[in-house]
Amino acid sequence: MTKKHDHFLLVCSNCRGSDSTDLAIRTLAGRLPDGFAIRMVNCMAGCDRPTTIGFQAPGKAQYLFGDIATHEDLDAVVEFAEQYLRCADGWTNATDRPQALFTKTLSRMPRIEQGVSL
């Protein structure tokens, strides 16, 4: 049976942080909640703060985190993935996110509202 993924952890393939992209992916693979898939992204413009990791899901706010460099950071990414999955609109406050990500948030973009004409 094929698993359905509707939540995505994006990992910059160009970042050169203290933990390599490959190490980040190996560390995160198998630890993310069901419904998540890891996608490599060519660049997310977080070049000054590698390694950058993003979160996306339909109908949810999107996040970009930078300076993901330690195993503690990667543990916090897994913890945030669980929080993000449970949150209906994906919107979280900085103080509610794992402490290791508190100063690593590069952006939070609101969800695109369904049925809103632009």
Image: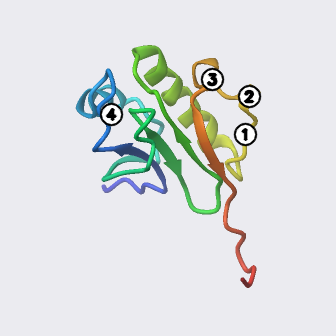
Q: How is the image coloured?
A: rainbow
Disc 2 versus disc 4: nearer the observer: 2
Q: For this view, does 38 lie left or right of residue 77?
A: left
Task: State if disc 3 and disc 1 touch (CB < 8 Å).
Answer: no
The quadrant of the picture occupied by the N terminus is bottom left
SS type, badge 4: loop
Q: Which comes sooner in the sequence, label 2 or label 4? A: 4
| Label 2, label 1: how far apart the Cα atoms are | 6 Å
Q: Residues within 10 Å of mark 4 (few under 14, many from 20)?
A: some
- Residue at the front extreme? 48
Residue drawn at point x = 32 percent, y = 38 percent: 15
Residue wearing tag 2: 96
The Cα–Cα distance between marks 4 and 3, rounded to whole angstroms, is 19 Å
Residue drawn at 47 percent across, 15 percent down? 72
Which residue is label 1 attached to? 92
Task: State which tag comes first along the sequence, 4 or 3.
Answer: 4
Mark 3 Cα shell of 10 Å, populated few (<14), some (14-19), many (≥20): some
Residue 29, disc: 4
Residue lying farthest to the bottom in this orientation: 117
Q: Are marks 3 and 2 in contact (CB under 8 Å)?
A: no
